[in-house]
Image (cartoon, rainbow, N blue to C red):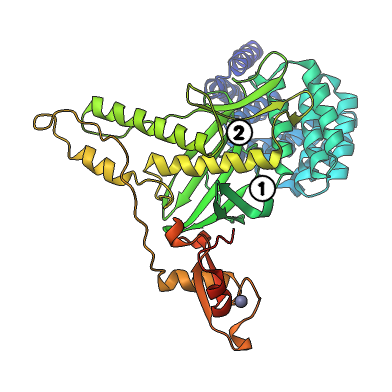
Amino acid sequence: MKDDVEDLLLKGSILDEQTKYEEAIQFYDAVLQLNPEHEKALLNKGLALISIQKNNEALQIFEKLISVNPNNFFAWVSKGVVFNQLKKYNEAIESLDKALLFDPNSGYAFYNRGIALFALGKPEDALDDYDRALTYNPSHFIAINLKKSLVLEALGQFEAAEEIRKSIKAKGMKHDNHDIVDEMDAHTFANILKNTQLVNNQINFGKFVLRCSNGFEDIIQYNHKDWQLLGKTHQYIIPLLAGDLKLAIQLYYNVSNFWRLFCFSKINGVSGMLFSVNLSTEKDAKGAIFLTQKLKFSGRFTGNEKLAAAHRRMKQSIFAELLRKLHYDVTDNNDVILGIFDTNQGKFVNTTPEKFLEDFIAISILKGHFMGNKGYELEIMPSYNRIQKLSESYDANIDPIKIPEKFVEQKGKRTISLSIRYKVLIRDGRKCVMCGRSPEDGIKLHVDHITPYSLGGLTAFENLQTLCEECNLGKGNRFSC
Ligand SMILES: [Zn+2]
């Protein structure tokens, strides 16, 4: 019977190594049928359950193991790991303290206690634990230092965090199936963006300005991983005529195994991805990342294939031409270049972080307009919707293939609706933006186009301002911006 048990345990361990956890558990269960208190079988089953995210079941197994042998170090440390997984950090610390009583030199226990302490808002204590973990378990250099760099960032010690990332890069290994150098570069890049703000909370397109307010509580959730590196630092609300456009800038390791910077949008219940740049593929041998992206559109047309393809090409060329006019760097191949980031120095070579951020958001918003299925249109741009309708009603049997030569010019409305008037007045604090007087000073307020309608200014929230009658009349058709 002893031979049976050893054999079953061995088979289970081999399956564990092959990450076939469900099958491994069957062998541990077979051992537990012979001996329900077999410590090694209980431990291995618990660890396999953690690997398949069955944390509550794992917890029960470790409780059982502790009832069998209260002095089992592995039972306590594993219980701590499970509590961390369940985000029950106080309980995790309790279990790990207990584990450290049995083995005061366990780097693994210190490492996991560090995770719990950091989650509980005790970064200094977490650092102490990570340092001890490194002392006792130097072979886990990458994993431990990775955690350390995040704690240092949280403490505002960015240079120290950067130093650690450099030492990790010097090891140049794989970590969790991806390249550690790429991962460190993504962290460095994220760190720069996290410390960057939009200048004056504005996005400028040539003469046109969109105002943003920072942050919203709900998340446009496309990625459930904890390591979305930007957190909520770049979430914006941009009031458009159609409603509030919410943008979330996210940086993570995606399913195609690339680190990518994304811009997601949400407006009136419609959400989607607007634009992204790849941080992994466009890196040269010297460590410069070219933040560039092909300007292209994927079609959703159900009608004629040729017509649909022609449409996509037309949109691409109109979009590229527009971006060139707005002085973005667009190559003859219709690649837009947002910047070059030097990973060795940890900074942009040819632009500022502020400008990069603004350009990234601006291009994302413009692209969303041209995509036509993101729930909003910008009044300053030619309308795309009418062309789409035309294409959908197209019948190849009746009409010869005819591609519209250009987009339909959109004619904005001059009339400012009451609700927009109200929003502008409230935004401007019910005061004339030029002289600061309010109705309490005996004047009447107007809502006025900043760039006059006659000069192409739009009836959009961003192009409207509150003026008193006097200032308004003095303004005439002069530009005020
Ligand atoms: Zn005034």
In front of the other: 204 or 12: 204
**Residue for point 52% across, 44% down:** 221
Q: Earlier in the sequence, mark 1 or mark 2?
A: 1
> For the point 76% across and 26% down, which residue is it?
143
Q: What is the three-letter code of the residue carrying label 2? A: Tyr
SS of the residue under disc 2? strand
In the picture of the structure, the residue carrying the numbered disc 2 is 252
Residue 120 can be seen, yes or no: yes
Q: Assign the C terminus to one quadrant of the image.
A: bottom right
Above or below: residue 13 compared with residue 260 = above
Tell me which image quadrant ligand 1 sits in.
bottom right
Q: Nearer the viewer, mark 1 or mark 2?
A: 1
Query: Looking at the picture, does residue 136 appear above or below residue 150?
Result: above
- Asked where in the image residue 393 lies, by quadrant, the reply is top left
> Depth check: 376 or 337 in front?
337
Q: Residue at x 70, y 21 (%)?
A: 288
- Above or below, 421 relative to 135: below
Q: Nearer the viewer, residue 288 or 167?
A: 288
Q: Viewed as shown, does residue 419 lie left or right of 28?
A: left
